Image (cartoon, grey):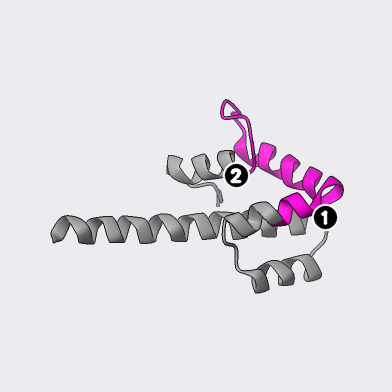
């Protein structure tokens, strides 16, 4: 299963928050490389990005404690995508509710 949504909004958030090239054709590869770089070179920036995305701190701590290497990178990608998807679903529901009022 592809963890990247076909919905452009999720991709737009990933591109914006992780400072990826919007012209990148392989977003999963670019995001994997970016998170790998941040894990090794700038964990503070990575945590800041995840904090701005509002990733649950206990889930983040669990991932950082229990995973390494590619498993950790994939866990962080999943946490990011799940949170973005949740935000978009809430916004869509709220928007739909406002239209009905």
Task: Please name the residue that numbered disc 2 is placed on.
Answer: 17
Mark 1 or mark 2, which is nearer to you? 2
Residue at image location 29% in from the left, 60% down from the top: 94
As drawn, the residue found furthest toward the top would be 23
| Label 2 Cα crowd, 10 Å radius (few <14 / some 14-19 / many 20+) | some
Q: Which numbered disc flags the more N-terminal residue, 1 or 2?
A: 2
Q: Which residue is mark 1?
A: 69
Q: Inspect the magenta stretch and tell me whether residue 54 lies in it.
A: no
Numbered range of the magenta stretch: 18-47
Residue 79 located left or right of residue 94: right
Q: Residue 41's spot in the image, x, y percent?
A: 85, 46
Label 1 element class? helix
Q: Quadrant of the C terminus?
A: bottom left
Neighbor class of circle 1 (other Cα within 10 Å; few <14, some 14-19, many 20+) is: few
Relative to residue 24, is residue 75 depicted above or below?
below
Query: Callout 2: helix, strand or loop?
Result: helix
Q: Residue at x 57, y 56 (%)?
A: 53
Residue 83 location (% of width, % of height): 53, 60
Residue at position x 35%, y 57% from top?
91
Question: Who's the residue at 68% across and 60% down the image?
Answer: 75
Res 98 → quadrant? bottom left
Q: Main secondary structure of the magenta part?
A: helix
Residue 96 place in picture, x, y as percent: 23, 57
Separation of residues labelled 1 and 2 (CA atoms) = 21 Å
In the visual, does 73 lie left or right of 3?
A: right
């Amino acid at each position: 299963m592809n963890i990247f949504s076909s919905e452009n909004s999720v991709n737009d958030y990933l591109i914006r928050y992780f400072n990826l090239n919007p012209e990148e054709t392989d977003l999963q590869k670019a995001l994997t490389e970016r998170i790998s770089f941040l894990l090794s070179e700038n964990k503070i920036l990575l945590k800041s990005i995840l904090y701005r995305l509002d990733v649950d701190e206990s889930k983040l701590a669990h991932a950082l404690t229990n995973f390494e290497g590619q498993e950790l990178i994939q866990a962080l990608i999943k946490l990011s995508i799940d949170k973005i998807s949740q935000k978009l679903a809430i916004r869509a529901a709220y928007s739909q509710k406002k239209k009905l009022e």
